[in-house]
Amino acid sequence: MSYPAAILILALIVLSGAAVAGGRGAKWKAANLGIIAGIMAAGFGIGFLIGRISDDMTAGGHAATSLMLLLGCLAAVGCIVRNKLRHTPRELDSQTQPD
């Protein structure tokens, strides 16, 4: 395993944990986990498709793994932001609206 992949795996674990823990109630925790897993599956599918199109499944496997980890981290960050927006919409509106 390469060093950047280890960093991405660690980031995915930490961000996914924060996203799931930040959800209020079991419904939102499960929704966050489902969103992260679904986006990771989409990244894996895109990488696999790249391998099929280029007829180089080795490169496709590397692309699938990288895209899966990157999109999983991106989905986890999106879930964290959505948790914050859902919990405190009035505070965020007061910060973005001019007086």
Image (cartoon, helix red, strand yellow):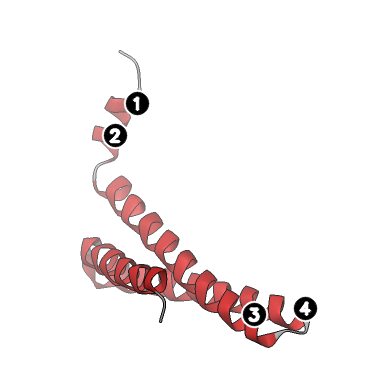
Of the residues tagged 2 and 4, which is closer to the observer?
4
Q: Secondary structure at mark 4?
A: helix
List x then y, in percent, for residue 90: 26, 34
Q: 60 or 83, which lies in front?
A: 60
- Quarter of the image where one finds residue 61: bottom right
State how far apart marks 4 and 1 are (Cα): 46 Å
Q: Earlier in the sequence, mark 4 or mark 1?
A: 4
Q: Earlier in the sequence, mark 3 or mark 4?
A: 4
Which residue is identified by label 3?
59
The alpha-carbon separation of the residues under discs 3 and 4 comes to 9 Å
Q: Are marks 3 and 1 in contact (CB under 8 Å)?
A: no
Spatial separation of the CA atoms under disc 2 and disc 1: 6 Å
| Structural crowding at the residue carrying mark 3, measured as other residues with C-alpha within 10 Å and reported as few (<14), some (14–19) or many (≥20) | some
Compare marks 2 and 4 and give the one earlier in the sequence.
4
Q: How many marks?
A: 4
* Distance CA(mark 3)–CA(mark 1): 44 Å
Which amino acid does the dot numbered 2 rest on? Leu
Instruction: Tell me the amino acid under the disc marked 4.
Output: Ser
Residue receiving disc 1 = 96
